[in-house]
Image (spheres, coloured by chain):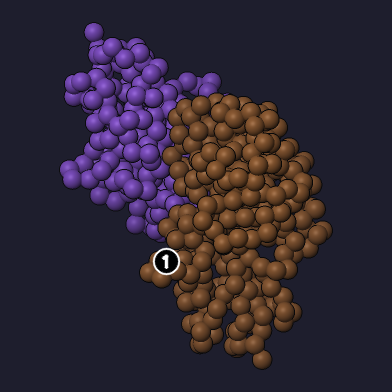
Chain colours: A brown, B purple
Amino acid sequence: MKKNICLIVAYDGTDFHGFQRQTNASSIQWHLEQGLSQIFSSPITVYGAARTDAGVHARGQVVNFYGEGTIPVEKIPYAMKGYLPLQIAVLSAREMPEHFSVRHDNVGKHYRYTVVNSRIHDPFRLRYAWFIRNALDLDAMRQGAEILLGTHDFSAFEGKNTTPMNPVKTMYAVLVEKEGAIVHIDVLGDGFLYHMVRNIAGGLVDLGLHRLTPVRFREILESRDRNQLGATAPAQGLCLEEVFYDERRLHQCLDDLRAGHWLAR
Amino acid sequence: MKKNICLIVAYDGTDFHGFQRQTNASSIQWHLEQGLSQIFSSPITVYGAARTDAGVHARGQVVNFYGEGTIPVEKIPYAMKGYLPLQIAVLSAREMPEHFSVRHDNVGKHYRYTVVNSRIHDPFRLRYAWFIRNALDLDAMRQGAEILLGTHDFSAFEGKNTTPMNPVKTMYAVLVEKEGAIVHIDVLGDGFLYHMVRNIAGGLVDLGLHRLTPVRFREILESRDRNQLGATAPAQGLCLEEVFYDERRLHQCLDDLRAGHWLAR
């Protein structure tokens, strides 16, 4: 009898071509499938909660797969260490009900986009942040964040040339916080279009640099036209922090974020 | 008239063969000298406060050099951005009295060694920490730290095959602090032998794993014999945090460290 097993996975995405398996390119999905196929001695297909792009990181990606084997589920994270590159770590494993899907059963996701706002860059954050040299106006960014809150058609924030999906999403929180030179943009919503968080980050940075006014930002959102918005923020600043399967945990995270209980990582 | 100019420099040491210029190897010193020689249109020699090893990082390395040019001193950090790899950043520049030496005039240095103590490693700290899988006994490590405090002949903690130097050094603080899976070993002293902090970290980890008792650790220190101690901790966990040229700043840092005012970075 195959078990439906769910893993929480962290990765430094710098050296991978994104989550999704591709021909001739090293992906997170491919590495997980290779390792699990060894452990379960049969071909395993892994399903991911989010398809992170090339260069995007995750502290809390969630995947599931069906496997039949003798290994106790809780030992999978340690067994996987032997098969994964050091940039990928399986943090935990848990058996779930037969029909549980990481993709369809989640109630929201938390992404964090990190900007370093300083005239001199920080060599230790090269792989994990977008460097913006000119001073960002945090108030302007927060006005933009406020505009995005709630339920909207986010077509203007969708990546180009993508498979169409329902563009109506609800943002439960869009927060801009600063500690020293580091600006975190935390976005928590029920779902995200392709490139959506990076387009939000790009738009908020344009607001912070006064390349865009809040009035214009609202017009762009309402236009539902992707060509109105500026450039997509670079991949290395983005991290999938958590995927929620439980309203209580989602609300706890919202409370923590709103109370400023976040650490510059 | 040449000015004596002092720079504070940060670097991610992963991709360099240490601070010191070497034949056929990329060093921090070489990169700084190349950039400064361009800016000052004449060959510049850079002197460093500390010779960090290959793979060791710095948030506060201090260097000085003599240069004559039209560039205002405070613009040097921005000008250097055009010549340095992104892993090296000049944080600030200041003119100093003619005979000031970063190497001879410092009153102490602060190094931090970072350990991640967890059965599953953290992909985001690969470049900046030593992973220890088995649980560390922090009390045992702190007993060892206590033994190192004060003035001792640290020959037992010196790297092998090095140029002889005075092995008597004073440690003002050796602190072991834990936050989550991260264990920081902060060492602040008036001077350090080659490999000394990495040997201290290696010794304290051996204490934390009960491979060594505090009694034996004290015997090793007193033996002044390098062959008594276990392995040197790996380079990537070490960071030169600050070099002090002023007793007041040194005591402020000691107070901050003792009060636990440090953040897991």
Q: Which residue appears at 35% of the width and 13% of the height? A: B72
From this view, report whether residue A252 is shown above or below residue A210: below
Q: Nearer the viewer, residue B46 or B176?
A: B46
Q: Nearer the viewer, residue A65 or B154?
A: A65
Residue count near mark 1 (Cα–Cα under 10 Å), binned few <14, some 14–19, many ≥20: some
Asked if residue B202 lies left or right of residue B254, the reply is left
Where is the C terminus of chain A found, in terms of image quarters? top right
Q: Nearer the viewer, residue A46 or B8?
A: A46
Instruction: State which quadrant residue B59 falls in.
Output: top left
At which x and y percent is residue A31?
Answer: 47, 71
Instruction: Report if residue A83 is visible in the image.
Output: yes
From this view, report whether residue A20 is shown above or below residue A238: below
> Which chain hosts label 1?
A
At which x and y percent is residue A103?
Answer: 66, 68
Q: Which residue appears at 49% of the width and 45% of the height? A: A234
Q: Secondary structure at mark 1?
A: loop
Asked if residue A41 lies left or right of residue B67, the reply is right
Question: Looking at the image, how many numbered discs can be counted on the residues?
Answer: 1
At which x and y percent is residue A58?
Answer: 57, 57
Instruction: Report if residue A74 is visible in the image.
Output: no
Q: Which residue appears at 53% of the width and 36% of the height? A: A116
Q: Which residue appears at 22% of the width and 45% of the height? A: B25
- Residue extending farthest to the bottom is A1
Q: Amino acid at mark 1?
A: Ser
- Which residue position is annotated with label 1? A26
Asked if residue B125 lies left or right of residue A243, the reply is left
- Residue extending farthest to the right is A248
At which x and y percent is residue B66?
Answer: 26, 18
Where is the N terminus of chain A found, in terms of image quarters? bottom right
